[in-house]
Structures are given as structure tokens and as C-alpha cells.
Image: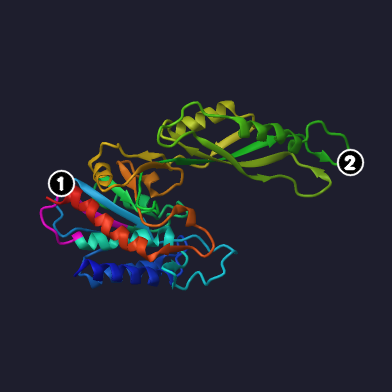
């Protein structure tokens, strides 16, 4: 099995995955195609819901374990597509199709890398690969559901498009539902306590508020009001305005600290977090995995976007072929060359880290 043949098989796998719809929670058919890959290479695997996982042949419980993870679910295509999102097309070196960049290219590259190392003996680390579901929806049946099933993980590579640069930190996420109250009434009568007008000062507060602690790698916490809902008819002043607030949390705060600050400070009737499990994540620059990447000429940075790193408690590195600015865009694509280079770089990186 040459690297050239393995890479060609990975690219064909990505083409197949593109042509199988796999919206979050509907990944059963792509899961079956991933199973077929492992069967082809005689790699035993296990399946939990739509998550497929395997360990290297020479797994040794006395050694630390490296997780290789990426996801095979996708968002739904937006209305701007001019190409068929479920048809894999190569034009001018670009492989078009829904999920090609986010994160199919990363997934097939990691699967090829795992397959390359599967039968290697005397590695410094065990390998576990998880092709996971429900990443895009942050659902309950994705990677988070696998952490009690797979062996204990000591460090992880999460495959997301980073142009094969080293995302050594990632912001967490807390979504809040906030309420601004007022006095309901008929629009024909005077009302000095209109909830919609009251929300103007509240919106300005959210726009202007700054959290004190910035991060060297992730910068400031970013807070954005993303949804507003109020009123049901033209002649009735509503009792309240509902806001949705998106907070991207740096590594200087826990999600709970963000909740405490906003519940004390925000000028709302109420502000309630939907959940706290999507935490910020990081890996020390001094970690051997990061140092191996730096030795290969890779640069480090902090990522503002969320991934399955948020459910991991171990040090984790986000790294993969493709460009995150293409994710969720119309006519999504990844360069075929990016996949070829990604597989080669993953193998070089792991060779430095895990080979004796």
C-alpha cells in the first residue's frame, strides 16, 4: 500500500461522502461508507449510533493514547449554491460539494493517516480514530457520547480546516436567552414602558460591554446579539422582547464565570444560559505534538470557531486541510492538492511524535 494509492483512495472516499446526504443526526449512510473503508483495509472497527471508531493493531494500555477525530455530518446547503451540493465535481483542481471542506477533507486525510500507521509496531502512542456525528449541531450523539466508550485519551488532533496550521487554542461558546420586559398595551394609547424601546439601551449595553481579560492566543471574549423576537400584531405593545446572545469565550474564563458576570451585570429581566459544555480549549506550545508541527514549518494561532475540541478535557490541537472561511459557503470546495499535502503532513507529524 503506497502513500500515492492511499491518498487516491482517500480522495475517492471524499467524493463518495459528498454524494451521500449526511445532515446532523442523519449520518447513517455516510457511517456505512466509512465502515466500508475500514473493511477494505482489514481494520476492525466499532460503531456507536453514527460514530465509527477503531484503534491501532498494536494497542497497548500502558501507553498514552492520541485521538484522531473529525466529523462526517454537514450543515444543510444554503440558497446560494449554483452547483449541485451532492455532486462531487473537480474543476481547476477544486473538489466541489457539501462537506468537502468542512470537514470531509480533514476526515478522509485522518482516516488515511490512521490506516498508514495501523499495523506499525512499537509506537510511542496508541492511536484511536473516531469519525463522529452531530458536530455541526453540537448534538448529544456525537464525539461527546464516545468519550465514555473509547479508551482514555491523553492528547487529540481534531480535524478541521486550518490550512494545516496549528490552532493551539479555540474559543468556547455560551448561548444565552435574555428577556427585556415592559408594560403591554394598545398601540393607540400612551405607554412610557414599551419593551421594544426599553431594549434599545439593553442592545447598546451588549454592544459596548467588554470583558476584562484578553487572551494572548484568542484575544477578547466576543459577545454578539444574534436574534430578536417581539410582538405578534401591529396594534399591540408586547410585554417583552426576547434576545439571543452568542458569547465566544477565551481561555481566560470558564463558561460558568461568563454566566456569573452577565447575570450580575446585564440590564435584563433575565438572562439564562442554554448550556455550559462547549468550553474553550488549548494545548501548550511546549507540548511535543505542537513542537513537532513547528519543526515542520507550521505556524501556531488561536481559532475563533467552535469544533469538537469543546467536549474534550485533554490537550487538543485543531489541524486540517482546507480553509475555514470556505465552510458553510455556497459552492463549498477544497483543493485536491490540499488533501494530498494534508495526508503527507499528518504522516510526517505523527512520525515525529509517535514513531520510535
Q: Is residue 212 above or below residue 302?
A: above
> Which image quadrant: the N terminus?
bottom left
Residue 32 location, x and y as percent? 34, 70
Residue 232 horizontal side relative to residue 67, left or right? right
Within 10 Å of the Cα at label 1, are there few (<14), some (14-19), or many (20+) other Cα atoms?
Answer: few
Residue 181 location, x and y as percent? 70, 35
Instruction: Tell me what residue is drawn at x 46 percent, y 43 percent.
Output: 304
Residue 270 horizontal side relative to residue 347, left or right? right
Q: Which residue is mark 2?
A: 188
Report the Cα–Cα distance between label 1 and label 2: 74 Å
Residue 52 horizontal side relative to residue 265, left or right? left
Residue 9 location, x and y as percent? 29, 71
Q: Is residue 220 above or below residue 79?
A: above
Find residue 63 and name its label: 1
Q: Nearer the viewer, residue 175 or 345?
A: 345
Is 26 inside the magenta-drawn segment? no
Q: Secondary structure at mark 1?
A: loop
Labels 1 and 2: the sequence-earlier one:
1
The answer to whether residue 168 is visible is no
Say which of marks 1 and 2 sits in front: 1
Disc 1 + disc 2, Cβ < 8 Å: no
Instruction: Tell me what residue is drawn at x 76 percent, y 35 percent.
Output: 197
Q: Secondary structure at mark 2?
A: loop
Instruction: Tell me what residue is drawn at x 16 percent, y 60 percent.
Output: 57
The answer to whether residue 67 is visible is yes
Q: Nearer the viewer, residue 295 or 146?
A: 295
Number of numbered tags placed on the structure image: 2
Instruction: Tell me what residue is drawn at x 66 percent, y 35 percent.
Output: 203
| Quadrant housing residue 88 | bottom left
The magenta-colored residue range is 117-130
Is 127 inside the magenta-drawn segment? yes
Q: Nearer the viewer, residue 275 or 118?
A: 118
Amino acid at each position: 500500500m503506497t502513500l500515492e494509492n492511499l491518498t487516491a483512495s482517500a480522495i475517492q472516499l471524499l467524493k463518495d461522502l459528498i454524494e451521500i446526504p449526511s445532515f446532523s443526526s442523519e449520518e447513517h449512510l455516510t457511517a456505512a461508507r466509512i465502515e466500508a473503508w475500514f473493511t477494505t483495509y482489514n481494520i476492525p472497527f466499532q460503531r456507536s449510533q453514527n460514530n465509527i471508531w477503531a484503534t491501532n493493531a498494536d494497542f497497548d494500555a500502558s501507553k498514552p493514547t492520541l485521538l484522531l477525530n473529525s466529523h462526517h455530518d454537514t450543515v444543510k446547503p444554503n440558497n446560494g449554491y449554483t452547483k449541485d451540493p451532492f455532486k462531487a465535481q473537480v474543476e481547476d483542481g477544486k473538489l466541489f460539494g457539501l462537506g468537502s471542506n468542512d470537514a470531509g477533507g480533514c476526515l478522509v486525510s485522518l482516516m488515511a493517516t490512521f490506516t498508514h500507521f495501523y499495523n506499525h509496531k512499537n509506537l510511542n502512542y496508541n492511536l484511536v480514530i473516531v469519525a463522529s456525528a452531530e458536530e455541526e449541531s453540537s448534538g448529544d450523539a456525537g464525539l461527546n457520547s464516545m468519550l465514555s466508550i473509547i479508551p482514555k485519551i491523553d492528547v487529540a488532533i481534531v480535524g478541521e480546516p486550518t490550512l494545516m496550521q496549528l490552532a493551539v487554542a479555540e474559543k468556547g461558546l455560551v448561548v444565552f436567552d435574555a428577556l427585556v420586559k415592559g408594560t403591554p398595551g394598545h398601540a393607540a394609547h400612551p405607554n412610557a414602558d414599551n419593551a421594544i424601546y426599553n431594549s434599545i439601551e439593553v442592545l447598546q449595553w451588549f454592544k459596548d460591554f467588554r470583558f476584562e481579560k484578553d487572551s494572548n492566543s484568542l484575544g477578547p471574549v466576543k459577545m454578539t446579539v444574534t436574534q430578536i423576537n417581539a410582538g405578534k400584531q401591529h396594534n399591540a405593545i408586547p410585554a417583552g422582547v426576547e434576545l439571543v446572545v452568542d458569547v465566544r469565550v477565551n481561555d481566560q474564563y470558564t463558561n460558568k464565570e461568563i454566566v456569573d458576570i452577565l447575570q450580575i451585570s446585564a440590564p435584563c429581566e433575565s438572562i439564562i444560559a442554554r448550556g455550559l459544555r462547549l468550553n474553550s480549549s488549548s494545548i501548550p506550545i511546549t507540548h511535543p505534538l505542537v513542537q513537532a508541527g513547528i519543526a515542520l514549518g507550521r505556524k501556531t494561532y488561536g481559532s475563533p470557531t467552535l469544533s469538537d475540541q469543546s467536549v474534550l478535557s485533554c490537550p487538543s490541537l485543531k489541524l486540517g486541510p482546507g480553509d475555514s472561511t470556505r465552510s458553510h459557503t455556497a459552492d463549498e470546495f477544497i483543493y485536491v492538492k490540499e488533501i494530498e499535502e494534508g495526508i503527507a503532513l499528518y504522516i510526517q507529524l505523527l512520525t515525529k511524535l509517535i514513531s520510535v
